Amino acid sequence: MSDGHSWHSDVALEEGRPAYLPRGLKRVPRGVDELATEHLVLNMGPQHPSTHGVLHVLIELDGEEVISAEASLGYLHRGIEKLAESRRYHQVATLLDRADYVSGLHTETAFALATEKLAGIEVPWRASWLRSLAMELNRYASHLVWLGTFGMDAGAMAPFLYIMRDREMILDILEEWCGSRMMFNYVRPGGVFADIPAGLDAKIRAWLRVADSYLDDNDALLGGNEIFQARIRGTGLIDAATALAFGMTGGCLRASGVDYDLRRDVPYCAYGELDFEVPLGVNGDNLDRYTVRVGEMRQCLRLIRQLVDGVPEGDFTAKVPKVFRPPAGESYAAVESPRGELGIHIVSDGGLTPYRMRLRSPAYFNLAIVDEALAGGLVADAIVTLGSLDIVLGEIDR
Amino acid sequence: MPAHQPADVLGIAGIACTAAEEGLGSVVRLDADRILDALAALQTVGYDFLVDLFGTDTGERIELTYHLRAFATHEDIYLKVLVDYDGEAASVWHVHPAALYPEREAAELLGMSFPGHPNPKRLLTTDDLPPMLRKAELIREAGEVQLPYE
């Protein structure tokens, strides 16, 4: 009977109950209050459209109110950390694209930075710059996916269609540049795989000329909608202390008012040279997470303008042998991915492959707060709150 | 700036440890049974953010790494403890709720346990799957997955 989930332990099968009824719908009276309704366990996912992948959330409900919530993970577990132990350092990026499949360049860069730290590889300045430019384009595409799906979670269908059109424009640019729309395999230890194609900067500039007005349109269409605002204001509250205790990073943490961004505080690649602001929230509700991310998108465009105008001359990669053995030791490098601090921890024993590779996934830690964030709210808000966390299951399950 | 060096803080709390500056950064090694006390002591001096927790199979034992950060100053330290196969280390979720998921993951993927964890279920893999991150668990080799007619 029990499938290991704590709430089911006191739920017994009712005689003659139709077999198609989910187990959670079996009502068991609790307490002595005759007027109190029984709790109901709702299985959300793993095929629910608003779980952004294959997430399974068990929600215990008292009427419309969420009493507790628990995420059940692992539907997308491919053992990336184990597989990396049998891949040479140049081959691991292929795996990491499939971890966070919405912004693969960030994961690749984190791995490249950790490898370079370990092996003492000096990266040409142009390569760092190209990495930053590609990452910011990827960040913008990732935030667009979030913006569209977040609107859909709240019932706004139309913005999604416009936003996906905008994202296509970036994916076209990235495809011409890296050879793939999502599985880039572009950032390698030592630099990047190929130089930026001639004429691509003109295409990026052409896109930048319309990007601002598209973002304004989408923001007005979605964020300017009074019904949408009413749905997201004051729901899914996460205070700063709780967010920090659960290891949250990225936009979710900044929405709670904690001023922390790796790009500014621990600069990597070209970010030390760039001028941008870090948008902050106040309350840590869904509205704050919305405004922080949309603010980040505006900063993103600002960064892309600086990056595309200032690509320095030089090599796009250092001379790194195809097969190399970094010295035994450990290294950790982190980047600010669209979801937060994405860290790669490599343990090397001096061999051809990493002895152990750990992927510190930001969405994994952001999701752990699901019980705190959903409990006390309404079930309809639970979906919006989950959407506001911007989870990518490929990165959570690895 | 945290007022004290991590090793001094642990020394005052009566926790035996060895500290070293390695390529990774500041690494502190201590006994597994004092990890909860150590994290609590370090939290009071500013190491208040658990960045990550993971295990590595060293070939003889499991090495757990607790990656801590003094959030105000961006200073990272790494606490390392050694645990036997199928051994245990106290759950640190009282001090750092961020450890709730990684502890469940380390338990199933490396074959160990974290007494005191409020929800010690498997997180990523199904029941009866052997702990895959142990070095003894081999990934299938190319010859095993070749199709018979090739």
Image: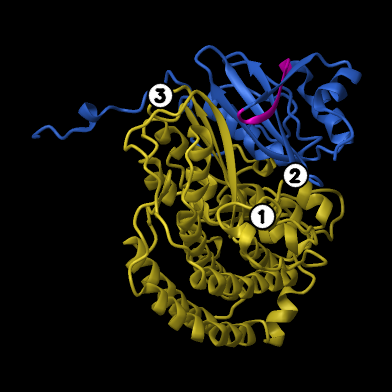
Q: Nearer the viewer, residue A199 or B144?
A: A199
Q: Nearer the viewer, residue A309 or B83?
A: A309
**What crowding class fits label 1: few (fewer than 14 Cα within 10 Å), some (14-19), or many (20 or more)?**
many
Chain under disc 3: A
Region of the chain picked out in magenta, as a range: B23-32
Residue B30 belongs to the span the image colors magenta: yes
Give the image location of residue A32, x and y in percent: 86, 50
Residue indicated by mark 3: A351
Give the image location of residue B101, x and y in percent: 64, 39
Chain identity for the colour yellow used in the image: A
Residue B118 belongs to the span the image colors magenta: no
Chain under disc 1: A
Magenta stretch mostly in which secondary structure? strand
* 3 and 2 marks in contact (CB < 8 Å): no
**What crowding class fits label 3: few (fewer than 14 Cα within 10 Å), some (14-19), or many (20 or more)?**
few
Q: Is residue B122 visible?
A: no
Q: In the displayed image of the protein, which residue is found farthest to the left? A: B149
Residue A59 is labelled as 1
Residue indicated by mark 2: B74
Quarter location, residue B91 = top right
User: Of label 3 and label 1, which has the lower sequence position?
Assistant: 1
Quarter location, residue A353 = top left
At 46% from the left and 26% from the top, the residue drawn is: A355
> Dot 3: what SS?
loop
Q: Gap in Å between the C-alphas at discs 3 and 1?
A: 46 Å
